[in-house]
Amino acid sequence: MAKFEKQFNGDFDLVVAAIEEAGLTSISATLEDYSNYQNDSLQVAVRVFERFSYFGGNRLSLNVTLVGEGKRLFLSVITAGGSQAVFFKVNRVGEHTFLNKFLGDLRKFW
């Protein structure tokens, strides 16, 4: 598992659009599912992406949650998968690669 969390200021809708674009930059990436919630000034967007890891020979997921209250935003990104072992993880390269590539496209917001 690889994890990244960040608080920053920005436009919720622009960041959600960038999340959807950044999650699909890999040729094997798919948007598996999504959820949106809004109540008064609180907005929440959840996106789950999946892609094939050539290094590990398996599929990885990238789960993104963006919470917004006005211009204040909180982003949480967590990857999972990437190991072929039965009882413990022996290969996390694919998870970190997926996370870092995803974040590279979003760093312009903070």
Image (cartoon, rainbow, N blue to C red):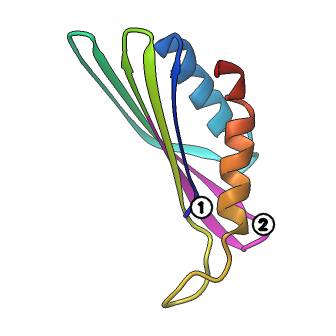
Q: Position of residue 77 (x, y in %)?
A: 52, 44
Q: Are marks 1 and 2 in contact (CB under 8 Å)?
A: no
Depth check, front residue: 59 or 108? 108
Q: Amino acid at mark 2?
A: Tyr
Residue drawn at x 61%, y 65% is: 59
Mark 1 element type: strand
Residue drawn at x 53%, y 12% is: 10
Q: Which residue is mark 2?
A: 54
Relative height, residue 87 to residue 18 (above, below): below
Residue drawn at x 72%, y 73% is: 56
Mostly what secondary structure, the magenta segment?
A: strand
The quarter holding residue 108 reads top right
**Does 58 lie within the magenta span?**
yes
Q: Position of residue 52 (x, y in %)?
A: 68, 60
Relative height, residue 63 to residue 79 (above, below): above
Relative height, residue 7 to residue 64 (above, below): above
Of the residues under marks 1 and 2, which one precedes in the sequence?
2
Residue drawn at x 65%, y 49% is: 99
Mark 1 and mark 2: Cα distance apart in space: 10 Å
The quarter holding residue 20 reads top right
The answer to whether 12 appears left or right of 23 in the picture is left
Local crowd size for mark 1, using a 10 Å CA cut-off: few (<14), some (14–19), many (≥20)? many
Q: Position of residue 84 (x, y in %)?
A: 61, 83
Q: Which residue is mark 1?
A: 60
How many numbered dots are placed on residues in this image? Answer: 2
Q: Quadrant of the C terminus?
A: top right
The answer to whether 70 appears left or right of 99 in the picture is left
Which stretch did the figure color magenta?
49-65
